[in-house]
């Protein structure tokens, strides 16, 4: 029997062997293969997959990292004709935004997980602490609005981190930007309006307003002193934090998804509008290695994982009868056995459209989810993939500059008013204008074809 090797990002569930025993029984029945699923930790995944791709090491399926770059290098198999043939049922369920966001020169090199193609950023609060101090979050629309709330927590709960952030946190502009190279690089476009100019987001007043708020928080002691270098974990279920920034989408059913994970009620306030973005489209996408000797079987497995409700729910919800039980109309009931780290995550495992919905979720909530998915606007960047060949050296130099400043600016350890001009001078020396010109040229050509 053929065994397919698949790499996944994250931490392996504690009951991984039990989950895979059930899953492989189903997979063997349906397509006569076995799945060897190997987890690589969050902090190591990108580096290890880069080594695997560069070395030509054999594997079949993997969660994509640096999707566009690696696809353009030929690291991934072209799935354009294989997906409709070997994964037709699951492929037809994909939101068109996923197809548009993963096409490169008209070809598909990935099978994205059909889930929250429409996402926005929210500030999520520990309701235990909100209730304890009768704190009102109704007026929270941006970081600056947190100030009086954080002050109360700092004074009343010295053991609690007021705003739980660390290395990798990225401050958002409430105006809403999208980033052709991700929010770690200084290139952005506006979600709304007719302006198609690409710009440096750190030159915009609305972004500076967010960065200045974070710096005030840092100086007041609301942000951990080592936030720019810390990888400290703040578990959702613990009362070690008051507010945090979360990316959410319609399949979270408001705050339900995070609250289930936390085992207690959490409440959120949005700070950006929902949009269908390239980041969401490519955020959880599986690729097949161009070196795989089992390409068709790999695509067939992805199709099964994303269309077979029994298989997928057994992985994402846990062991049936212990963690959950099915009720009528594709609904389920969570049982006492449903515990953190005893199941896989839904957002990066398989098609959320076939996951059973908790019986506690109302029909109105489901209708609202579907309406948001249907009506959310597309980012103007959706479908645009910047070809970096002509400016590789400049991009490497720019990345080095951003590595020096980005974390400090985002978490507030650096003051934007002093730091941004210094950073921009170094960006200019690194070749920022050259990259911007080439990017704008390609983006204008892309827009002209729309």
Image: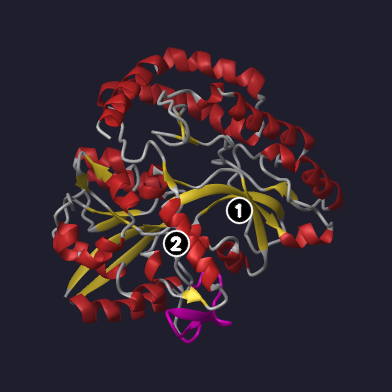
Q: Foreground: 394 or 177?
A: 177
Magenta stretch bounds = 321-342
Identify the residue shown where x is 28% and y is 80%. 26
Q: Secondary structure at mark 1?
A: loop
Q: Foreground: 448 or 9?
A: 448
Identify the residue shown where x is 50% and y is 85%. 322
The overriding secondary structure of the stretch rendered in magenta is loop
Question: Relative to 394, is 160 on the left or the right?
Answer: right
Pair 1/2: label in front: 2
Expressed as whole percent of the image width and height from the top left, the position of residue 247 reads: 53, 50
In magenta segment, residue 149: no
The residue singled out by tag 1 in the image is 233
Place residue 204 in its image quadrant.
top right
Badge 1 crowding class, 10 Å Cα cut-off, few under 14, some 14 to 19, many 20 or more, is few
Mark 1 → mark 2, Cα distance in angstroms:
33 Å
In magenta segment, residue 327: yes
The residue singled out by tag 2 in the image is 370
> Vertically, is 340 above or below 432?
below
Place residue 167 in its image quadrant.
top right
Identify the residue shown where x is 39% and y is 36%. 380
* Marked residue nearer the N-terminal end (1 or 2): 1
- Tell me if residue 191 can be seen: yes
């Amino acid at each position: 029997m053929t065994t397919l090797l698949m790499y996944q990002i994250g931490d392996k569930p504690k009951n991984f062997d039990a989950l895979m025993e059930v899953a492989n029984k189903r997979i063997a029945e349906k397509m006569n293969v076995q799945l060897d699923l190997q987890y690589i930790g969050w902090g190591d995944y990108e580096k290890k997959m880069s080594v695997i791709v560069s070395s030509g090491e054999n594997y079949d399926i993997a969660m994509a990292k640096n999707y566009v770059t690696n696809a353009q290098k030929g690291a991934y198999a072209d799935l354009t004709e294989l997906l409709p043939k070997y994964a037709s049922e699951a492929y037809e369920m994909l939101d068109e935004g996923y197809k548009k966001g993963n096409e490169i020169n008209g070809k598909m090199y990935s099978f994205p997980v059909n889930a929250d193609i429409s996402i926005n950023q929210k500030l999520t609060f520990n309701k235990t602490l909100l209730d304890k101090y009768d704190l009102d979050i109704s007026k929270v629309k941006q970081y600056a609005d947190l100030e009086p709330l954080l002050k109360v927590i700092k004074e009343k709960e010295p053991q609690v981190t007021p705003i739980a952030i660390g290395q990798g946190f990225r401050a958002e502009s409430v105006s809403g930007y999208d980033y052709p190279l991700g929010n770690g690089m200084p290139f952005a476009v506006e979600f709304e309006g007719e302006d198609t100019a690409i710009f440096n987001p750190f030159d915009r007043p609305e972004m500076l307003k967010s960065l200045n708020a974070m710096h005030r928080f840092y100086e007041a002691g609301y942000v951990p002193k080592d936030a720019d270098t810390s990888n400290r974990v703040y578990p959702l279920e613990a009362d070690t934090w008051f507010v945090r920034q979360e990316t959410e989408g319609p399949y979270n059913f408001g705050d339900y998804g995070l609250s289930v994970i936390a085992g207690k009620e959490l409440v959120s306030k949005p700070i950006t509008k929902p949009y269908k973005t390239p980041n969401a489209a490519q955020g959880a996408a599986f690729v097949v290695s161009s070196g795989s000797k089992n390409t068709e079987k790999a695509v067939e497995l992805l199709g099964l994982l994303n269309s077979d409700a029994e298989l997928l729910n057994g992985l994402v919800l846990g062991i049936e009868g212990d963690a959950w039980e099915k009720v009528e109309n594709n609904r389920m009931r969570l049982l006492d056995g449903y515990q953190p780290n005893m199941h896989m995550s839904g957002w990066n495992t398989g098609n959320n459209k076939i996951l059973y919905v908790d019986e506690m979720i109302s029909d109105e909530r489901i209708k609202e989810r579907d309406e948001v998915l249907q009506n959310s606007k597309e980012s103007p960047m959706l479908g645009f993939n910047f070809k970096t060949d002509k400016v590789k050296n400049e991009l490497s130099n720019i990345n080095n500059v951003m590595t020096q400043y980005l974390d400090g600016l985002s978490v507030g350890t650096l003051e934007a008013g002093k730091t941004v001009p210094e950073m921009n001078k170094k960006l200019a020396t690194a070749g920022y204008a050259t990259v911007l010109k080439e990017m704008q040229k390609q983006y204008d050509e892309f827009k002209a074809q729309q």
